[in-house]
Image (spheres, grey):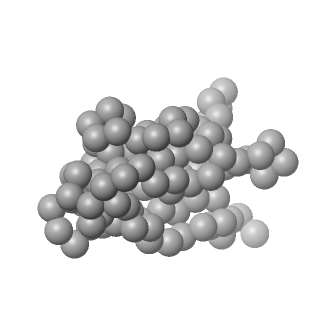
Amino acid sequence: SFFQEPARNEAVAVAATSTVVAEARQEAQPRKTILIRNTSAGADIITVALGLTQAAAEAGIVLKPGESFSDSTESGYMCFQGTITAISDLGAGQLSIMER
């Protein structure tokens, strides 16, 4: 098959304290693609941090509602494999995450 099913496709609640939203991947099962979208019902602004044990507001990738971030393996570049954390400014955020 030419299509690869997502290994994960789910919504994750994001609070006002740092939350791990994607675990680090191992070499045997590397992450090829990740798409993270702020699907909060309210006005929550979510900060996503790559490789940090604690996310901090506005110290990383800042996503307003409806905005997204993606990373993927390309020629000569490997998709980020480490832990991904996030924090919401209002404490009631939601991220939709698809990874394979």
Q: Is residue 38 visible?
A: no
Q: Is residue 33 visible?
A: yes
Residue 94 spot, x, y in % from top left: 34, 66
On the image, which quarter does residue 37 sit in? Answer: bottom left
Question: Which quadrant of the figure contains the C terminus?
Answer: bottom right
Q: Residue at x 66, y 27 (%)?
A: 76
Q: Residue at x 75, y 69 (%)?
A: 1
Q: Is residue 42 above or below residue 25?
A: below
The outermost residue toward the top is: 76
Q: Is residue 100 above or below residue 18?
A: below
Q: Residue at x 20, y 58 (%)?
A: 90
Q: Is residue 1 above or below residue 15?
A: below
Residue 65 spot, x, y in % from top left: 22, 59
Q: Residue at x 59, y 44 (%)?
A: 83
Drawn side of residue 73 relative to residue 11, left or right = right
On the image, which quarter does residue 61 sit in? Answer: top left
Drawn side of residue 55 relative to residue 72, left or right = left
Residue 70 spot, x, y in % from top left: 45, 47
* Of 27 and 12, the residue lying toward us: 12
The outermost residue toward the right is: 28
* Of 27 and 46, the residue lying toward us: 46
The outermost residue toward the left is: 43
